[in-house]
Image (tube, coloured by chain):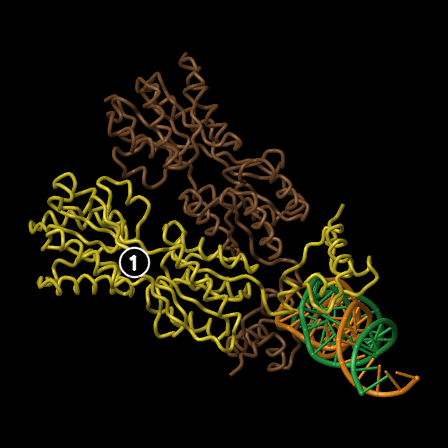
Chain colours: A brown, B yellow, C orange, D green
Amino acid sequence: MKKSKTTIRDIAGALSVTSSTVSRALNNHPAISDDTKQLVTAMARQMNYKPNRLAAALRSGKSMNIGVIVPMVERSIFAAIIRGIEEVVAQSGYGIIMCQTYDELRYEKRAFDTLFRSQVDGVIASATRSSGNIELYKSVIEEDIPLILFDRSIDELGVSSVVVDDFKGGYEATRHLIEQGCRKIVHFAGDLDIKIYQERLKGYKAALAEEGIKFEAHRVINCPSDIERGRKAAEQIILDNDIPDAIFSSSDFAALGALQVLKSKFKIPEDIAIVGFANEPFTSFVEPAMTTVNQHGRDMGRLAAKAFLDCVANRKGYVPRQIVLQPELIVRASSKKLN
Amino acid sequence: MKKSKTTIRDIAGALSVTSSTVSRALNNHPAISDDTKQLVTAMARQMNYKPNRLAAALRSGKSMNIGVIVPMVERSIFAAIIRGIEEVVAQSGYGIIMCQTYDELRYEKRAFDTLFRSQVDGVIASATRSSGNIELYKSVIEEDIPLILFDRSIDELGVSSVVVDDFKGGYEATRHLIEQGCRKIVHFAGDLDIKIYQERLKGYKAALAEEGIKFEAHRVINCPSDIERGRKAAEQIILDNDIPDAIFSSSDFAALGALQVLKSKFKIPEDIAIVGFANEPFTSFVEPAMTTVNQHGRDMGRLAAKAFLDCVANRKGYVPRQIVLQPELIVRASSKKLN
DNA sequence: TAAATTCGTGCAATCGTTTGCATTACATGA
DNA sequence: TCATGTAATGCAAACGATTGCACGAATTTA
């Protein structure tokens, strides 16, 4: 039994009306009488009608799908963001086409390709490293579809964004360490091509400055968000024989690597306190539990989604806005020297 | 500059040919001369032509998108699977529309809705609990589009699937514990509505039987994949005062919860050995590192994707196949009583 | 040299909906 | 009674690409 999918014309035929009427009835158009609507929906159900969104999308220009681009879904912050987005847009009938960039430009390109070809009605994205991809994002703007950035924004674009205050996050994390009596604080800096990592570094510097602690460049170690790199960095610290009394890592993963290496030789937090960033779930159950910074992923997602909906609602009159969430320092055992 | 998107007709006009020719040239149709193809592609680039997949999809019946349904992306196994799928299908030009079910039927329904309306060319899914949703999956089959199941299959459907041998996983994990000298082995069973958890339990029983250890029903504790529930279960064990010498948990999360609670009162693994299931990343860095079962998520994804491609390649002659991957026991400190 | 192929394109229908612009049938007001 | 208004529906043209069929020209075959 071939599936000759039922179309609105089939329904129209069965009811002796036109497909226009069926279409309007199905879309709850005001000009259609309630009686007709009843009949149509009933018949649609009976004939097991499934609307063809493609056709509708082609004609109306709205695919009712939005693209979401994240570095990678296994990072809990992004999973949380996706969930937040989904929660909100699903209400308005949008589906999500999700793409991962794995932080590589070629995948980012492919992502945009996929999205464009699917004619998404909007893109909610977290940019990868900030070079070379601006053109990609500009192309979205040229397509004249809403673009919302989250987590990692690109200021030059002047589009709406939802980010967390990374400067403040870095500042508070560092300040907390200072309050615990730390003076020789190492910072694991992320990829400084990416703005969020620059900001965290700035926050670190600002906190030091505020407390009159001299900033020492050699205490800033380049260390991507990766357990192994964190281990390497920690090993280097040990070799250097200039043992710090704290580490503020720009990522939980690097912090974890360092923790693993250092805990065998030092007491954490007594000898060396450690603070991470991102509130990955594992931070709460490593040993000792790790102090970190919560970025409110789910909220970020929700807000980004709302910004998107706003944007489509008042297309012309929409004014881009930058939403900045306050990070939340979660203090756990890995950094508590006092009390 | 309004963006009146360039269509193949525009290209055709500029080149004084018809849109048919342009279409064929762009699709590398054999009947078009190489010269023409060159001209067309050049002009397409020059005019910044972006194909409208919707239109193509509508006409050709192929959206070049496939739907992927997972319980939730933050579970690393699913993130890995998605990545595996993506790797393979991207090669053939497919995009992925990803939906999460959060293990709830209503979201599963919504997922199918989203996918159908987007006219996906196939669905690769992991089913939620096995009741109530069969109809959903049947509806996919009725639509006559390829359906591939992974991780959690539904045998009645008779479609292709890629799963890991959960029975064997349970068996090997338990056998390993027995080899370490354990006799009183508790099993944290997952939701027994879901087949994979049934299988893990069966494997557990089989290993016990093989070694002549009596199966005791009270040693099977219902415990969903959740840290908190694992803690609860462990607390109950302590209260019950019938301390086991090992726990085989059907999930890493529950195992972790138990580990957290038990390590304060018992020596792990000496007093109580612990084995989890799924090889979540955290298992390797909790303390002590946790023995677990690797499910080869990325491979599962790849294989599922290949099955899908096979299925579209020989539509009529395709014979569904069940692929069963061998799980891999990863032995770590949490279960090594010997040597 | 005529007939038969082959090659490269054009024509026009089609995919399933949406939607601007009639059109019809009444009801209302003057 | 006639113009006007309104509510409900029909007509037909899009949307942008694909594709079966036809066709003229060039090439090969007999």
**Dot 1: element:** loop
**Residue highlighted by disc 1:** B327
Give the left or right position of residue B137, taking residue B216 as reference.
right
**Figure check: A202 above or below C21:** above
Decide if residue A17 is on the left or right side of residue B233: right
Q: Chain of mark 1?
A: B
Q: Is residue B222 above or below residue A227?
A: below
The answer to whether B329 appears left or right of B272 in the picture is right
Give the residue type at disc 1: Pro
Query: Does A20 sit left or right of A268 as displayed?
Result: right
The vertical placement of A18 against A233, above or below, is below
Query: Mark 1: few, some, or many residues within 10 Å (few <14, many ≥20)?
Result: many
Farthest-out residue, left? B241
Q: Position of residue B241 (x, y in %)?
A: 6, 49
Quarter of the image with the C terminus of chain A is: top left
Counting every numbered tag in the picture gives 1
- Residue A9 lies, in percent from the top left, at 63, 77
Image coordinates for residue D30, horizontal then vertical, percent: 80, 87
Q: Position of residue A123 (x, y in %)?
A: 57, 48
Foreground residue, B221 or A327? B221
